[in-house]
Amino acid sequence: MKRKYFILLLLLLSTSVLFAADIHFTASASKTEVGTTEQFEVTFTLNNNGDRFTPPSFTGFLVVSGPNTSTSMEVINGNASSSIAISYVLVAVKEGTYTIGPATIFSGGRQLNTKPLKIKVVKGATAPQNNAAAAAQSQSAPDSRVTMKRPGTDINKSLFIRADVDKNNVYLGEQITLTYKLYTRVAIVGSEPDKLPDLNGFFSQEIKNPNQNPNWHVETYKGVKYNVADMKKNILFPEHTGNITIDPISMLFVIREAAKASDDDMFGQFFGTYNDVKYKIKSAPTIIHVKPLPPGKPDGFGGAVGKFSISTSLDKKEIKANEPLNYSIKISGTGNLKLLKPLSPVFPADFEKYDPKTEDTIAEKESGETGTRIYNYLLIPRHEGNFAIDPVKFSYFNPATGKYVSVPTEGFKIKVNKGTLENNVTAFSGADKQDIKLLNKDIRYIKTSGDITKNGEGFYDSTLYYSFLAFGPLLFLGALIYGKWYEKNNSDIVEVKKRKAGRIAAKHLASAQAQLKANNSKSFYENVFRGLYGYLSDKLNIAAADLNREKIASELKARSLDEGLINELLDTLDLCDMARYAPVSGISEQQMFDKAKNMINDIEDKL
């Protein structure tokens, strides 16, 4: 009985594991390459029931629709199955390659994640669709019913965009919160950006919306209720005085409008018909009046506009010379924190100061730019003593009160004890002679009078100095003369070959001697033959292809060479030529080598 229960339990566990393994949660995109301002759809599909769905962050894209949820159920042979599809319609805003991260959902008692999707955004052009279904969709009937119209009076009352600013009369550097709001009383089928504002004349920071979905709410404007969504929010800081215009934002909207059915369309007359019409809507320009800051700027004012506090800190107040010291200035508040100019604290002259490292913890919120900026200074005191760091002067302009505010900071006293390396370090506090410190006699004042060396005692102004000085032109003249001689001596190629004929023949004979020692007769005679023929070719200026017995004899006779030597040379050439193919007798190889060597020497002497 226990065995039956055990088998039943095992079967149930196996079934549950198999069921869990069949659950799939996938992500897909209608296009993987899109153009800027082009819409595409991302769909997350689960082949089971699920809950607690968490979408990814669609960074780089504008969500114009979604989440759109659809469910389906199927019963086959009594087995029921269900699936969920959650889709978003996105618009690409800027060129680049973006990654849509994984979405998560809980199903079957565990968390499931999709794989990331890569989307490539190209400039303006419509990217090709990545599947046949998407291509078919682009040519389907609903798109053919979309017509472009200019916004008339009626649509402008039902659909418009407002550039809403929290204030339009500000001081230079005062922050402004800009919100582009969409007001609608019609059914919007689709939308896409047409032209985003440049915001010239402002330092702009976008307020990130953690929720990718637009937050719709009801708002009454000029006595009429509208559905309103915040499209885009920015914090602006005017960069110059005068009137600055905020450019309009332009959007394209597809509106579903009722249409009259034709007389032969009974289905349309009964259920009604519609047309999808595309309208181009843009906001009106907004002018911001920027006033200059009032006169009378106090010490320590570096352009800070807002409301701030400041504090300073020091990690140690007693230290040894040549040990590091950390000094920090922390500015907190709301305003143009990112536009603050670096402060200029004054440190003791004996302190070595490094450029500060800046740490920003700043958030862009609807209330403005708020957070902290910290300047960290690394200081190294070089000598012992008691020193002081004066308070930092910091001032800002408060636009709410229209007044400058100076905020005091804390000063610090520092005791520096003698360090182990102090004897080797010199400190300078100024350029004057009285400001140089004599430390343990390691530096003394420079003498400005008195002779250090006499003329002629050192290398400079000595006989050797002038000898080297004169040697340079002589060396140049010698190199010039040698260059002329070398150019003249090597200009005649025939004469050069004649001069080098003996050296080239000697190389062949040296190779022949090596073959002689190795008892390689064939190679020996080959090198002797080449040495003699090559020598005669260069010496007599006859091409190797034209060299033969008759030519050699006639050229040597023309140069008045002894006929006995000529005949001996010809016999030696014949013998070497024969020995390359068959053994010879009557003369040893050493005798042949000596004979060839002596003949070359005799010809060199007589020619």
Image: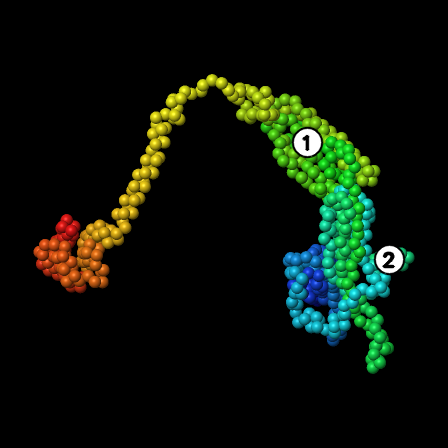
Residue 458 visible? The answer is: yes
13 on left or right of 458: right
- Helix, strand or loop at mark 2: strand
C-alpha span from label 1 to label 2: 53 Å
- Residue at position x 65%, y 38% in the image: 357
Quadrant position of residue 453: top left
- Residue at position x 63%, y 35% in the image: 355
Can you give x and y, in whole percent of width and height, for residue 497 in the image? 24, 53
Quadrant position of residue 558: bottom left
Q: Amino acid at mark 2?
A: Val
Check residue 603 in the rendering and tell me which mark sits there, or answer none: none
Q: Please, which colouring scheme is shown?
A: rainbow
Residue 112 visible? The answer is: no
Quadrant position of residue 423: top right
- Residue at position x 88%, y 59% in the image: 225
239 on left or right of 545: right
- Which of the pair 422/556 is nearer the observer? 556
Can you give x and y, in whole percent of width and height, for residue 551 in the image? 16, 61
- Which of the pair 552/503 is nearer the observer? 552
Q: Amino acid at mark 1?
A: Pro
- Helix, strand or loop at mark 1: loop
- Residue 42 versus residue 310 in the image, above or below: below
Which residue lies under the disc numbered 2?
Answer: 218
Which residue lies under the disc numbered 1?
Answer: 345
